Amino acid sequence: MKKKTNTPTTTVTRDLEKFSEPTGNLYESVVIMSKRANQISADMKSALEQKLQEFSTYTDTLEEYTENQEQIEISKYYERLPKPSLVAAKEFEEGEVYFRNPLEQVEEEEDQGL
């Protein structure tokens, strides 16, 4: 993960009314946060795979498998990072997540056309 955040690594009690303010609907807010968490997770996974690939050694058989200390340290680093769902909730709470509802845009366009 490239940017540093002050996201807690443990579960935090949150005010549900704050989550529903931007959208007017708690469930819509949860969907937005879950989609953002999936994006963060995919980014973290690709970054981890890329870093592990730098230290990979190709062997012919399974018996030749050796532990690579650098790979272990990188894996431990990523395990200590905050979970994607916590990062997404923090970003949503701070207003850093851009979202739009395509259904609302269609309704607005229809209203303007009438």
Image: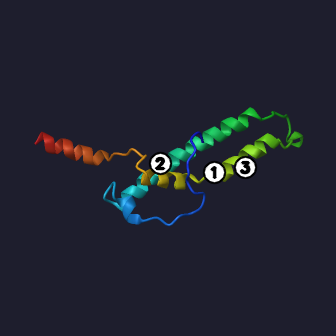
Q: Which callout, 3 or 1, points at the residue further toward the start of the chain? A: 3
Crowd band around label 3 with a 10 angstrom C-alpha radius: few (<14), some (14–19), many (20+): few
Mark 2 touches mark 3? (CB < 8 Å): no
Q: What crowding class fits label 2: few (fewer than 14 Cα within 10 Å), some (14-19), or many (20 or more)?
A: many
Q: Could you tell me if the residues under marks 3 and 1 are in contact, i.e. CB atoms within 8 Å?
A: no
> Residue 39 appears at what percent x and percent y?
51, 44
- Residue 97 location (% of width, % of height): 42, 46
Where is residue 50? Give x, y as percent. Answer: 67, 35
Measure the alpha-carbon separation of dots 3 and 1.
9 Å
Q: Quadrant location of the C terminus?
A: top left
The residue positioned farthest toward the left in the image shown? 114
Give left or right: position of 50 versus 89.
Answer: right
Q: What residue type is labelled 1?
A: Leu
Give the residue displayed 20% in from the left and 45% down from the top: 108
Compared with residue 17, is residue 53 higher up or lower down, i.e. above or below?
Answer: above
> Tag 1, which secondary structure?
loop
- Disc 3: which residue: 76
Q: Which of 67 and 92 is in front in this view?
A: 92
**Front disc: 2 or 3:** 3
Measured Cα–Cα span from mark 2 to mark 3: 23 Å
Crowdedness near tag 1: few (<14), some (14–19) or many (≥20) residues, C-alpha within 10 Å: some
Give the secondary structure at mark 3: helix
Name the residue type under label 2. Arg
